Amino acid sequence: MNNFTNSELILTNQNFSKEVLESNKPVLVDFWAEWCIPCQMLTPIIQDIINEFNEKIKIGKLNIDKNPSIAATFEIEAIPTLILFHNKKIFQKFIGIQPKNLIVKSINLALTNKN
């Protein structure tokens, strides 16, 4: 069982549209599964990003095993996959473990991009 902070949103089929697609803030979604070792390795990076961006963006995790239809909708073929949503669409997609600075750079671009 993974330990997520209170500021990290657990995404499901039921809340994905409201929390991600209808959000007024950029949303970073971590597509993962419990059995995925690289996903677990990404967790500390995600925690750092949560601490750094606090209320400026939303960060959520979507378990692909429990929510396969959303994973299929966004063509998740490998995990971990991170998708940064901004203005109701995909702003950036990262496949595999990424360095924190690359993710942060994309988040900062989304925060400054008003389109």
Image (cartoon, rainbow, N blue to C red):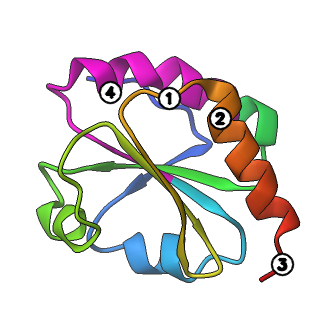
Residue under pointer 3 = 114
Residue under pointer 4 = 39
Which residues fall within the magenta stretch? 29-49
Residue under pointer 1 = 98
**Crowd around label 1: few <14 · some 14–19 · many ≥20 (10 Å):** some
Q: Is mark 2 on a helix, strand or loop?
A: helix
**Crowd around label 3: few <14 · some 14–19 · many ≥20 (10 Å):** few
Give amino acid for label 4: Cys
Measured Cα–Cα span from mark 4 to mark 2: 17 Å
Give amino acid for label 1: Gln
Q: In this view, does 66 lie to the left or right of 2?
A: left
Residue 40, relative to residue 103: is it above or below?
above
The answer to whether one can see residue 56 in this image is no
Residue 54, relative to residue 21: is it above or below?
above
Q: Which label was assigned to residue 102? A: 2
**Crowd around label 4: few <14 · some 14–19 · many ≥20 (10 Å):** some
Q: Earlier in the sequence, mark 4 or mark 1?
A: 4
Give amino acid for label 2: Leu
Q: What element carries label 1?
A: loop
Q: Is mark 3 on a helix, strand or loop?
A: loop
